[in-house]
Amino acid sequence: MRVVRFPARPTRVADDVRAALTSLGRGDAVAGGIALLGVTPPETGVDVDAVLILPTGVLVVVGVDLPDPALTLSAPLDGVWVADGWPLVQPDQTADAGGPRGSPNPATAALAAAGQVADRIHGIDPAIGVGVVIAVGPYVERVEQPASDAAGSVRVVHPSATSMLAATEALPVPARTMTTGQARAVFRGLAPAAAEFDEAALTAEGFSTDTAGTTPVAPPPAGAVPSPRLQTWVISAMAALLVVTAILATILAVSSGDTPTPAARLSENSAAPTVPTDGMTADGMEFTLVARDHSRTCTAEHAVGDLRPYVTERGCTDLRRGSFTATLDGRSVAVSVGEVTFGDASAAEEFLALADTPGTGVLTDAATQHGKWPAPAPTFAGAAYASARDGATVRLVLAGEPGSAAPTDATYQRRAAFAALTLPLD
């Protein structure tokens, strides 16, 4: 399953939804399809925790935040929810205007939002089946649904890799898989600002080609138990913001659907990277420029993760990037600097808060993108991270192991990262 991340997190349980879906990995060996996280479909006006475009249909995932963790949650779709013996009542915002004092079902608003998204999907293609997953948290050990509800197209689950897989299998099995053309139409209709996937990527996720279009769906054998392919993710401010040279194109594809290319293209308004003939000094460290570029606008190639839709949808007025080697006491550090300017300080402040959150992405490295690092290039795995804001401008820095030198300890990397906050990028 390919994952496309947007900034919105409509509920607190959205983080659990993201973790569960990201852990499934790419390809159709487990579930296949495309996951849109935190998407706001046009003409709906609602932020949705996730929409899963699957070969068998579409699942709309809407979150419901419970007041506390629960061992057992009774969750009928049209009745009172009960958590560990206590009924849950959702406050109603219309109460002060003479409306009801509360809704007996915390999922009422979530189901209404899911209905708007389902209407949007059926407007694109009425033949596509749509199911709903109500993701509850912070934690629920067991969710009980009435048999009549479980027989329908709505599931209430605490989001984990296993429960999300089970929800995908609950979709009615269609006579034919969704074609790449259908998948692309739904993707465009729900996330028109995101870069699209190519035909090969979509077929790898289990969609049938438009010319074949007749691939039958094989139902899973009776009693089959899904076994998710889990990947281990180390979530920390240092390790989560990785720009891995050898797989940069793949990271870009997973994040937003770009077609991987051997060498990333320069955007039309980007200056070609340059290599300096002299160095600079900051905090006693000698910095030598490897590559830099300058763009008047932000495009999809300039960021990965949650930062990508932020800069492409909000837009920026200036972007400068520089790649350096820093040297002190005979030790070398690879440094990547990105500086983005927005139209106002509030947008910059919001961007910085997002960037400082572990696992949300980073501005891409100029030398990596343009192939300017000497082989072997640095990966920035476990890199030190530093950030700063000056009005409407935000600077992000990664400092990590050089690709072809002996390891440096974290002290040198941290020192280089903070020193690079003052480097000129002109």
Image (tube, rainbow, N blue to C red):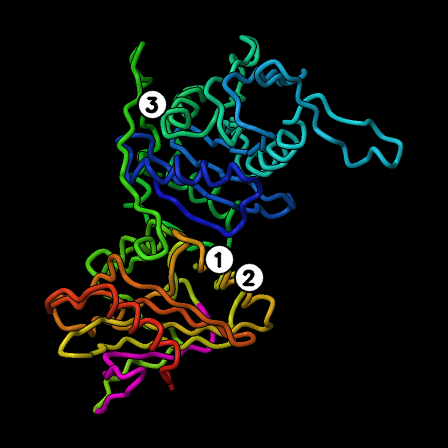
Q: Which mark is residue 317?
A: none
Examine the rendering and report whether any part of residue 294 can be seen: yes
Residue 279 lies, in percent from the top left, at 24, 88
What residue is pinned by disc 2?
350
Under mark 1, the amino acid is: Leu
Mark 2 and mark 1 in contact (Cβ < 8 Å)?
Answer: yes
Comparing 221 with 37, the one in front is 37
Gap between marks 3 and 2 measured at Cα: 44 Å
What residue is pinned by disc 3?
217
Q: Residue furthest bottom?
A: 278
Disc 2 packing (10 Å; few <14; some 14–19; many ≥20): few
First to last magenta residue range: 278-298
Q: Is residue 379 above or below residue 155?
A: below
Under mark 2, the amino acid is: Glu
Residue 97 lies, in percent from the top left, at 88, 36
Which callout, 3 or 2, points at the residue further toward the start of the chain?
3
Considering the numbered disc 1 on the image, is that residue within a helix, a strand or a loop? helix
Q: Dividing the picture into quarters, in which one does residue 397 lie?
A: bottom left
Q: Is residue 279 left or right of residue 173?
A: left
What residue is pinned by disc 1?
354
Residue 287 part of the magenta-drawn span:
yes
